[in-house]
Structure formats: structure tokens, C-alpha cells
Amino acid sequence: MDSTSTPAIASAESLRSTEMEIDNFEDDRSPNAPLEARDAPPQVATRTVSPPQPNSPNAAPSPSRSSSSLARRPTIYSAQSPAKRRRTSSSLQTAQQRVDEESIVASLAVAALQASDTPPQSSVAPSIASAAPSTTHQPPNSAEDAVCVVTHATEQMTTIEELYVVDVDTPPREVARLEWSWDMARSSLDPEMQQNIHPLSCELVRWYTHRTKHGEYRGWFWLPIDTSILSEMHESYVGTSPRWELPAELPNERRDPREFYANKEFFDYRFLASRGMQHCDSVRRNEAYPAHWTVELVTQHYYPFKTLAPVSLHVPYHFAIVDAGKKLYALYGDRPIQEETLQHDFPGWSLYEWASIASVRNIYVAWMKARPDRVWMGNAGAAIADDEPAEILASHVYVAPGPDADIAVR
């Protein structure tokens, strides 16, 4: 062998060191094989690079294994196998032939990587800040554009549904009191308006609406972040500055909530989960959004989900207060909310969030205890005008079952 082949031999040795990344090709299409086998197209060898292991200091949390497409590990690269070459076991095969063989494999692998739809990724995940800034979500123009506002998942990653923040099946007597409190015309509140809807992954939609068969809410709600707006709303509808308890008398105030927003178009929220989500593993967030997602940038978040960044939505606060207030009333009723109770029910959060929780409960109760004018209600609403607020609110209350009761768990 001449000296010019030495670098090629060294290159071949180097290529062998990366053998774990390139599939070995075995020849099973011998001249004696059936005609169908000889004429069959070459198989595609797919190589999946696993994300970093959890014990690695630089590893990002990897998605859990579930039926959700978010949990599937995508193929990092696919190297199309060349036509399987005939190999000889002859001991007289020359070193130059081995060099040529390895060179062909390397050339085809490089060409396949360049043509692959998904480029190869580093096995070391970049660091991800746990307290990322809030992301503003515009209403989607079509179902194809829909992105979950919590996880940034797309239709390619999971099923995206429309979440109605205020339940479309809210009873008429409750809707009437919201319309009265919000200074609206009778029967003008439409829960299907765009302001009440945003896209969400199917898993989180189920958690948002989930109740046990005994009526206990076990999911999550949107908590408004802007305490200055909450404080103004509390003073107007409840009649006092924010506090842990409800006053003995409520003002029956009518005021358009838009007056509190100063032309705001987007509103910041926290994802607040109940203790029923302690074992939830459905919250996996695409940190690459709006760029194309990669498995290394999908992070797993756990209860109480403080690592989730605030979310900015086009949904105004008064819609979110209806849902959150109903869930909080089911938990606390009319009684004063103690700080120790909030520490137990919403651990890990601060006095800042706990005070907002109390304000939301109080504002909602003030709306449900409103007494609409009979003239405003009209003849069609006379039947529900006299409904007692206590009767309305009683339908929200969770009554703890006995120790032997069968709780309906998600």
C-alpha cells in the first residue's frame, strides 16, 4: 500500500469511533435470495438521539411517557441506508477496500443528514430560565394557528381545544346578576364572544373544568395579577378595600368593568392550581415558542406550577373572576379566609397571590348577591328576580363526603 492511503486509513479509524451514531449495514440480499427480496427497496435506518438523562447537571426535564404527542421523542435525525453492500469474509480484503467502504458510508450519512427534515441536535440542553417573561397570546385566526396559551403546544403536538373561561352553561339566574352588576342590557351577555375564549391543550381543558361527583373542584383557574385593578373593583363592587372577609352589607353596585381597564387590551394572569393537581404531569411547556419546538426545549412543570411564567391574554379580568370566584366560593363559602388556610390550599405562593385570591372570591360573591331591578329584569326575568343569593351560591358549595365515600378522581 502506498503512503497516500495513510490519511484515508486514519479517517476510517475515526469513523469507526462514531459507530454508535451510524447503523451497521448487513447484506441479506445474496444472489441466492428470492427475487422479491433482491428487488425490494433498501430499508431506511432511523436513529433517535435520546434527550439528556435527568441526572445530568445540564439536562432539561424530559417529557413523560404518555399517549400525548407531546411525550413522544421525535427523531433527531434519519440517515437513509445506502443499498446494502455485499461483504466478503475473505481474509485477503485489502485495507484500501475498507477505506473505500467507510468513505461511502460517511458520504451517504452526511448527505442524508443534510436532506433530513429535522436537523441533528446537541445532546446537552441549553439552560432555561425558570422565571421567563410573560407571553402575549393573540386570538388565533384559525384552528390551524391555535397554540395552547399555557404550554405553547400546537396541533402537531397535541389536541388543541377552545376553552370558554365563563362556562357557556352558566345558569340564567347567574348570568342575569352578572349583566346587572356589569351594567349591561338584559340578555346581552354572550359567553361565546371572542373575549371569553382562548386555545388550550385538551389535557388542561379537562383539568380546568374537572369536578368530582360530589362537586369538588380539583383543577386550576386564572388568577389576575394586577392588584391595582383588583383593588378598584373590590372597592366598587364589595364596598371596601381588599380584605380577607366579606362585609355584612354589599352595595349592589352597577358598573361597567371596562372602566377599570384604561383601554387595556391584554391582561396578565397566573396559573393557580388546587391541591387536586398535586400529581398532575400534564403541564409540559414548549420553551422554544414561537420558534419550531425541539425536545430539549420542552420543560416539565409540577405542582404548584410556580415555574410557569405569567400569561398575557385578551380575556378581561371580569370573565376570569367569574370562573375563579365560583371555584373559590366552593372552597371557602362566605367565611373569612385565613392566611393559614391559604398556605395549606395554595402552598408556595406569597401573600401577594393570597390577597388576590380573597379579592376574587369577594368580588364574585358581590356579583352573585346582586339584586337586579324588576323593571330591568322584565316580565321574562320575573321568575328568577326573586331567587335568593344564598340559594344561587349554595349550588357552588362543595360538601365533603363521609370517610367511606367514593371520590371521582380524574
Image (spheres, rainbow, N blue to C red):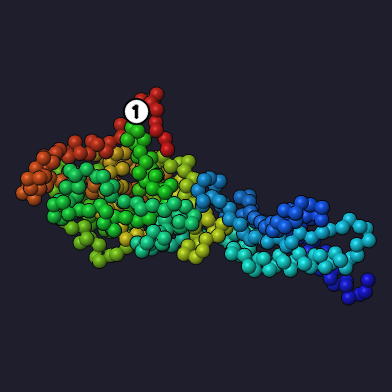
Residue 376, given in percent of the width and then of the height, sits at 8, 50
In the image, 361 versus 66, the foreground residue is 66
Q: Is residue 367 visible?
A: no
Residue drawn 27% across and 36% down?
Answer: 397
Residue 115, given in percent of the width and then of the height, sits at 63, 68
Q: Disc 1 designates what residue?
A: 401
Q: Quadrant of residue 21?
A: bottom right
Tell me: 31 left or right of 55: right
Tell me: 159 left or right of 353: right
Q: Is residue 107 above or below residue 351?
A: below
As helix, strand or loop, the secondary structure at mark 1 comes to loop
Residue extending farthest top: 404
Q: Tag 1: residue type?
A: Pro
Residue drawn 46% across and 57% down?
Answer: 154
Residue drawn 47% across and 43% down?
Answer: 280
Q: Is residue 166 visible?
A: yes
Q: Residues within 10 Å of mark 1 (few under 14, many from 20)?
A: few
In which quadrant will I find the N terminus?
A: bottom right
In the image, 83 versus 46, the foreground residue is 83
Residue extending farthest front: 35
Residue drawn 25% across and 66% down?
Answer: 263
In the image, 162 versus 284, the foreground residue is 162
In which quadrant will I find the C terminus?
A: top left
